[in-house]
Image: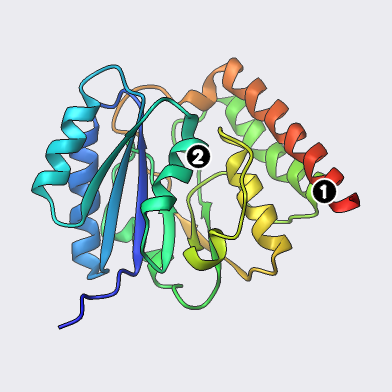
Amino acid sequence: MSPTPVALSVVLPAFNEEALLEGGVRQLHGALATLGVPAQIIIVNDGSRDGTAAIADRLAAGLPGVAAVHQANQGIGGAFRTGVQRAVGDYLILWPADMPAAAADLAPYTSQFGRADVIVGVRRSRRGYNPLMRFNAWLYPKLVALLFGLRLRDVNWIHAYRRELFTRVTLTQRGIPMLVEALVRLRDLGATFVEVDVDMKPRLGGVASASRFKVMWRTLTGLFAFWRLWRAQRNA
């Protein structure tokens, strides 16, 4: 009997997530089982200095369809690229280690499988955002539309990508701007898009890195670095 095709590969970057990783992965594993979606979960331990590596290995040994990969710290973009190399699903999705997952959170994406190459999650509200973060969330898609002509309501959340097409993309960004780079490069390859409304779940713990000025500045400079590269490549 041939193995069941994997519909979805979930890449879960984890950096110093010992407090949240086990609960988050078990919730995600259960949500996928509830939906009946044949899936794999790839935990990428991104150079953690706490007990994340041991927890990831224990989960991979105990849960069917879960794998653990370990690497030096490369940021969310580098972790995602590493996970993609191990993926076998028809679609790819990046899921934060610090965010709970229920079947209802994944259903908007899985319901669109086969209908579009890129499924863009659009947050109905921004849970836990302070006024500055809300302003940035309003401004960022407008800046992306101005720079790249990519007009989507939410460019910085959870997206699902058709794996066959995604593997043809070369990503240069390691951090948050990687999400925009993926969307722009897939658009340039002729990918089809669909937007789905989703709920933003509260974090399991900690403080969102997007609230830190250092991360905001790095995101902005990374976005413009990609824009300069993208323009140069288009004009070459």
Q: Which quarter of the rendering shows the N terminus?
A: bottom left
Position of 88 compared to 170: left or right? left
Residue ID for mark 2: 126
Task: Rate crowding at label 2 as few (under 14), some (14 to 19) or many (20 or more) other CA atoms within 10 Å.
Answer: some
Q: Check residue 233 in the rendering and tell me which mark sits there, or answer none.
A: 1
Specify which label sits upstream in the sequence, 2 or 1. 2
Q: Residue at x 58, y 28 (%)?
A: 133
| Residue placed most toward the observer, 151 or 88 | 88
Residue 94 seen: no
Percent across and percent down for residue 55 are: 17, 32
List x then y, in percent, for residue 232: 86, 44
Q: Which of marks 2 and 1 is in front?
A: 1
Q: In this view, does 16 lie to the left or right of 186?
A: left
Q: Nearer the viewer, residue 9 or 219?
A: 9
The answer to which image quadrant residue 53 occupies is top left
* Residue 49 visible in the snapshot: yes
Q: Position of residue 67 (x, y in %)?
A: 24, 48
**How many labels, in total?**
2
Question: Which residue occupies the foreground of this view, 204 or 52?
Answer: 52
Q: In this view, does 135 lie to the left or right of 117?
A: right
Residue 187: image location, x then y, percent = 69, 62
- Residue at x 37% of width, y 57% of height: 87
